[in-house]
Image: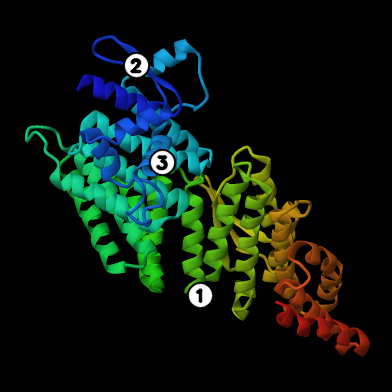
Amino acid sequence: MRAVSHIVTLCLTFGGSITAVFQDNHTTSHSHQECVSFLASPCPYHRFLCSDNVFENMQESQEVLMPNHLDEVIAAVSVTSKKRIPNKLLQTALFQPPREKLHLCEERAKSYSSSCEYKQAIQELVRCVALTRICYGDSHWKLAEAYVNLAQGYLQLKGLSLQAKQHAEKAKEILANSIENPYHDNTDIFKCSIDLFCTLGKALLSLQKFKEASENLVKAERLSKEMLQCGNIIKEEWVEIQARIKLFFAQLYQGQKRSKEALPYYQKALEYTELTKDERSLECVPVLRELAGVEQALGFHDAAVSHFSRAHLIVLSKNPSPEEAADSAHFIARAAVASGKQDHRDEPGMPLLTIPAPENNPCQYRTLLQWTSMHSVLSSKAGHVTMVRSSFRTWRDMAEQYFQESMTHVKDSEGAGRVKFLSIQDEFCNFLQITGQKERAIMILRESLEAKVGAFGDFSPEVAETYRILGRADLAQGNHIGAHAKLKKVKWEPALI
């Protein structure tokens, strides 16, 4: 049996030619195809590899040819390169214990996730599942934890909710059937259960199964509270768990268009995230933006601008890409436009913004100076700056400033960045028309027409809309020939599509 274990470990480790050492010390060279043939024989390890589908395409037909399926398995759990490596390295990797390989895969998964290499991260998480089963068996809570981590990977890194749900349910089944020593400390199992309920709840939420999602989130919240009361976790751990649970509950209510109920949960999620991650952490940015979106839905536009602005300061302090910086400024511009639709929002002296005082960062100071030119500083204490709207600046100035900043970040970009620039420019032109600056908007649209044709194509909706606006402008100016030529192109566009 030990010889079988060695061969399976080798098959899990190398995708090319390998060398297997048998109990009788006879050394034989095996090709990749021979390993596949060996795995196809009826043995417990073969059943382990084929029993559970831990790969991304889980909705394919079960009537897949066995050799092809085994090729995928071996490719997925291969830890090293398929290229031939030196004999010393081969020998080292050959006898590396599975637990060391498991630790290595876990570290690689974290590294790939942090560097946004999502495909590689998922592959490492798949390997972690295979190696965990080798190390701990079919009924150990560690295997459930590996499935939960894989489910989180599919959910957070790829947005594949159905796959995440199926992996989380597999983890739930393993935990239900796990056999543990009654005198063993179950704290790790309880923590794994909390992660399981949160992950399953989030996956169900993404699938719009709100009732089932709520049930799992309630279980996670109740279990975390009981663990805190029993002393199984410290207060800081509980706060970190609560930050996730409150955010998921907020998203649950917002997904059902229940913004009033979602608002306090978003506020609590932000509070807990700031306690655990620091208020200048990037983890606060998505919470701030979602909170601002709920506030906009409820008509609290000044609060929405405040939270979008806080998120913008954080993003600029972290050396963002041009696209990220453009998106961040774009959020504020949109919020300012929404704020301007309420007439009373232009009243001076209205409290608008409370932000953390910037650290020694030029980007943060520059953004703060832009805000102080638009607002009067009311107070500065406890590391925060509170401002009110000045009478000489309005929502129009704010919106234009952040539209311009957003476009500046991606003005010279190519590809997707160029498309983003033109889309923001269209929105800016629409803003100019709303605020009575039609001539300026028309001039910008005329200049952008050639670039739009290159980016979107002659018969794209974006180009058609530009022709429509320019045609109406020509018609209003009495240029009937020019108007006819442009509007004729708009008429032909749907027919050609």
Say which residue label 2 marks. 95
Q: Is residue 81 visible?
A: yes
Q: Amino acid at mark 2?
A: Phe
Q: Nearer the viewer, residue 431 or 473?
A: 473
For this view, does 25 lie left or right of residue 334? left
Q: Is residue 232 visible?
A: no
Distance (Cα) linking label 1 and label 2: 64 Å
> Which circle's residue, 3 or 1, is located before the other in the chain?
3
Say which residue label 1 marks. 299
- Kind of element beneath mark 2: loop
> Which circle's residue, 1 or 2, is located before the other in the chain?
2
- In the depicted structure, whether residue 402 falls above or below residue 100: below
* Mark whose residue sits in front, 3 or 2: 3
Q: Amino acid at mark 3?
A: Glu
- In the depicted structure, whether residue 426 falls above or below residue 481: above
Q: Nearer the viewer, residue 224 or 350?
A: 224
Q: Position of residue 291 (x, y in %)?
A: 47, 62
Q: Position of residue 309 (x, y in %)?
A: 59, 57
The residue depicted at 72 percent of the width and 56 percent of the height is 405
Check disc 3: other Cα within 10 Å, few if <14, some if 14-19, many if 20+. few
Say which residue label 3 marks. 72
Check disc 2: other Cα within 10 Å, few if <14, some if 14-19, many if 20+. few
The residue depicted at 39 percent of the width and 35 percent of the height is 74
Q: Check residue 314 in the rendering and tell me which mark sits there, or answer none.
A: none
